[in-house]
Image (cartoon, grey):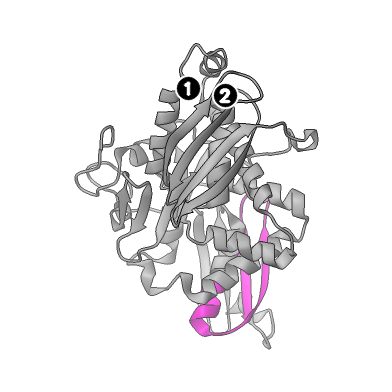
Amino acid sequence: MTGIELCPECGVPRHITSEHMWLNGGIIVQSRDRRNRMVFVECENLDPLFAGVQELIGLPIEHMLITAKRRAVRAYLGSLLPDVTKELLRRRELDWRPVNDGLRLTARLMGYGRYEVVDYRFEKDVDDYVVETISEPYSVPLACGDMAGAFEILFGCDLAAKYRRLTEDLYEITCYVSSHPEELKGRLKFRHFPVREGDVELERCKSCGGPLALSNYRWHPERGIILGSTTGKRMIMTGMEVDAIFGELENEIGEDLPGMFIEAQRRFVRAGFYSIEGMGRLDMRDQLALRGLGNLTELRSNQRGLYFRIENAFLHLMVVGLVQGLYEMTYDVDTHLEWNFSEDGVLEVSLSPKGQAKKSAVTA
């Protein structure tokens, strides 16, 4: 495929390993701006997790997801693109289509699916719109938010998004001019935590310098998907906008959201989405670091309970639900959960089987 160079040793696109850095603190950052954290995570659980939260609260949340992702992508691209580029786009002195081509190529390399422009109108008035299809989206509502956020930058106006399913893995997304409520403006925030040095040393590819474990995944740039070669699980490379989405949902739903999200993740993991054997040859510490989820500094686990401590934690609600679900699946028990996420990014999780003293999880 034109414009895509794969590493001859590990098979990973050069864009992935040149634009991102895996640091010894268990984090992934953008090479050009280390303030921007990234994660390399499974994505097939996203829509089921959102559906699980929706079931728990008894209210639809799809519109919240689209809005939160749109706002996050707009904020991210707004900081990434130079002001002069954005101004030229808005004055129509720079064609938006080549810029969009670059964004669509990046989306494919990140595992988001394949977008294609179908129709558009760009006359700088209320009748403007753009229609694209996306095949094999990593998440339908988040894909809508991705497209709307990107075109808000390209068109220089507020947009809404709607979609319709064409076939099993093909959707049509339409973005159209629409104002957004004032109360939602300016609230979205990207959280930056102090980064602690660590001692995680992932084995490196001698050719591109990226983690050699990435060779266990297969990139399919023509389709826009990344698959585990042994697990078959689909992956994405994504960033701080996912964490910002959780914050936005908490603003909308309330303080009960963290517990509901953990519970939805726990149920999904325990149902068998992950398997201990499917984690591969790396231990849990390296797996978390490969994904950019943090540096596992302490783990004690047996049938009496579990204690888990991770520095530089990221997407901590997903991690808590993952750990609880894996433990319950391993020992076939229900558990009491206690967890804490500090202001400096340290996550602690304690589990104990129900019917057993909670303190045993810490002393296990």
Range of magenta residues? 324-352
- Residue 291 badge: none
Nearest to the observer: residue 296 or residue 133: 133
- Type of amino acid at the residue the image marks with label 1: Trp
In depth, the one of 219 and 201 nearer the eye is 219
Q: Is residue 330 magenta?
A: yes
Distance in Å between CA atoms under marks 2 and 1: 8 Å
Name the residue that disc number 2 marks. 155
Name the residue that disc number 1 marks. 96
**Are the residues flagged by discs 2 and 1 in contact, CB closer than 8 Å?**
yes
Please state the horizontal and vertical placement of residue 317, each as a whole percent of the image. Answer: 62, 59
255 vs 140, left or right, is right
Q: Quadrant of the N terminus?
A: top left
261 up-or-down from 162: above or below: below
**Who is closer to the viewer here, 203 or 94?**
94
250 is within the stretch colored magenta: no
Q: Answer whether residue 239 is visible to the viewer in this image.
A: no
